[in-house]
Amino acid sequence: METEVKLPASEKLNVLVVGNNPIELGRVFDTLHKIRDTRIITEIAFDLKSIVERLIRFSPHYILIDDNIGKLELQNAVKTLLNVRKTKNIPITILKSSNYHEAINTGVMNYVLKENLTGDSLHTALKNSLKFKKTQRYLLNAYNKRKGQLKRLLLKEERF
């Protein structure tokens, strides 16, 4: 079940798109610009080095990574993005060529199939990934706050 976060009209989204095939990325850009009532600002990166270069001057709200960059490069990119202070809270969405390929699962909020990509479906996927990321941060903060209470409760039970 998909839920959609309602946004004000004329919002602005910064999207970093990572991939190595300009033809496929052109389709993704066309799809991004079909999103209604939203101004999309995009930057493109082709590998880990260019991702870091783009992040120096660009602050994305979302990161889209094409799975055709290769499994190892995809894993390295996601791992690096999750460990950089500037990008660790930015939702990452993987653009998949097919459902049959194995996907990386650590830190990725959403997967979208490229063959059925529309402006509305991509917008919904991006908003849902942001909602998932916010929920994940809230739960982590709540856990960190209360783990001391839980530890004291368990120690108290052991004494009895």
Image (spheres, rainbow, N blue to C red):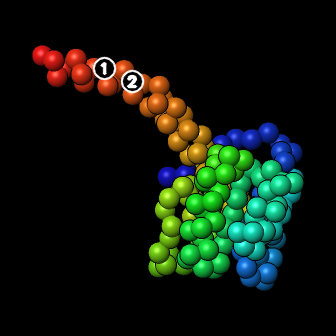
Along the line of sight, which residue is nearer the eye, 36 or 160? 160
Q: Mark 1: few, some, or many residues within 10 Å (few <14, many ≥20)?
A: few
Quick one: which residue is furthest to the left in this view?
160
Q: Residue 148 carries which label?
A: 2
- Residue 36 seen anywhere in this rendered image of the structure: no
Q: Position of residue 27 (x, y in %)?
A: 77, 76
Residue 135, by quadrant, is top right
* Residue bearing the label numbered 1: 152
Residue 12 as seen in the image, left or right of residue 147: right
* Foreground pick, 119 / 49: 49
Q: In which quarter of the image is residue 50?
A: bottom right
Amino acid on which the number 1 mark rests in the picture: Arg
Q: Could you tell me how far apart the alpha carbons at marks 2 and 1 are, in whole angstroms?
A: 6 Å
Q: Residue 14 carries which label?
A: none
Q: Is mark 2 on a helix, strand or loop?
A: helix
The kind of secondary structure element at disc 1 is helix
Residue type indicated by callout 2: Gly
Q: Which residue is nearer to you in this view: 5 or 89?
A: 89
Residue 54, percent across and down? 82, 61
Residue 66 vs residue 42: left or right? left
- Asked if marks 2 and 1 touch (Cβ < 8 Å), the reply is yes
Q: Residue at x 63, y 65 (%)?
A: 77
Q: How crowded is mark 2: few (under 14 residues within 10 Å), some or many (20 or more)?
A: few
Please name the residue shown 25% across and 24% down the image.
Answer: 154
Where is residue 112 shown, x and y percent of the image? 60, 66
